[in-house]
Amino acid sequence: MKDTVDIDGAMGEGGGQIVRTSLALSAITRRPLHLVNIRPRRRRPGIQRQHLAAIMAAQKVCSADVTGARIGSSEIYFGPGKIAGGTYEFSIGSAGSATLVLQTILCPLMLAEHPSQVTVEGGTHNIWAPPFDFLARAFAPLLKRMGPSARIDLKRHGFYPAGGGIIHAAIDPAPSLKQIEVNERGKVRRITATAIVANLPETIGDREINTVRRVLGSNIENRVSRVESKGPGNVLLIEIISDHVTEIVTSFGRRGLPAEKVAGQAATEARDYIRAGVPVGMHLADQLVLPLALAGGGSFVTMPPTGHLETNIAVITKFLPVAIHTDQVGPMAWKITIRS
């Protein structure tokens, strides 16, 4: 049996990403995982419902032996078996993030022997989680350059607190991942702002779009999209399509936060990304470092590394024999280089 990997969930930013990355790498490397101090500094520490859903999804795709997987637990043991492609359905049972559950099993299933069809029910557009649109249009195209294909579709929107959203992923795996370099953005070809509203006045979306246009310019494409969902919800998406990469910046409406502030947050982040001149935004960097490490090498240029990225790197190097370097190459540009 391979050596157990011991992970302290208090390392770095100490959040749920440590759980998800550790589970994915345990499944892929077939190395047992002993994870302690799970989310110790959060308002509700330990495993919560969406983390439990991620653990059980990972357990199912590789027939793992699991102990400690319960709400509130601060420690788990995960003994993986062989990853198996197939048809999977997971329900979080709350508005917890469906995209984070999919994120946990996406890389393992991309390296399985057979294709997979995965359906996850929960929140599709959640604060502190990548929304469906980001995974489908920013992350998945980069994965396709590396060999596997992940077509991610939205079946129904789900917002906090009602949930009830559904995403589906059709995953066509590859025997291994190709190394890629994402060091240049190229020319920005199109910027689109979309205000999504569900069971709320459409004027909220109009106010958000007007704010974005004031920050980014009146010539950007824009629309307000009214969608069906089990409960009310609002999200603003700014999609920046360049020659070599697509970035999606998101801000979520919530009670007590004016539409102008929702839009102002997203527009400012989008403007900072554009001015930085880098191809990979701060959130995409968190996602991209794992498949590149699994490929054994590659590089990308991004904005100043976040605590999430640095923590993800620390977890990855516990499992994989790779060196990951972060070097500043411009006023707001850092190059992340992965080598085996």
Image (cartoon, rainbow, N blue to C red):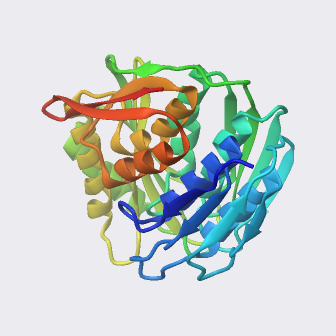
Can residue 157 be seen here? The reply is: no
Residue 118 image position (x, y, % from top left): 77, 48
Residue 265 can be seen, yes or no? yes
Image height check: is 148 above or below 23? above
Tell me if 22 is positioned left or right of 87 in this view: left
Image height check: is 192 above or below 12? above
| As drawn, 188 above or below 137 | above
Residue 253 lies, in percent from the top left, at 40, 65
Taking depth in this image into account, of 296 and 107 the one nearest to the observer is 296
Please name the residue shown 39% across and 77% down the image.
Answer: 41
Q: Which residue is found at the position 22% from the left and 40% from the top?
A: 272
> In the depicted view, which residue is nearer to us: 304 or 167?
304
Q: Name the image quarter holding residue 256.
A: bottom left
Q: Left or right: where does residue 50 sit relative to residue 65?
A: left
On the image, the x and y values in percent for residue 305 come to 29, 44
Above/below status of 29 relative to 96: above
Horizontal and vertical percent for residue 331? 12, 32
Pick out the residue farthest to the left: 331
Residue at the spot 82% in from the left edge and 31% down from the top edge: 113
Q: Please tell me how many numbered marks the rendered image carries.
A: 0
> Which residue lies at the image location 74% right of the left edge and 35% below the top edge?
171
Position of residue 170 in the picture relative to residue 268 (left or right): right
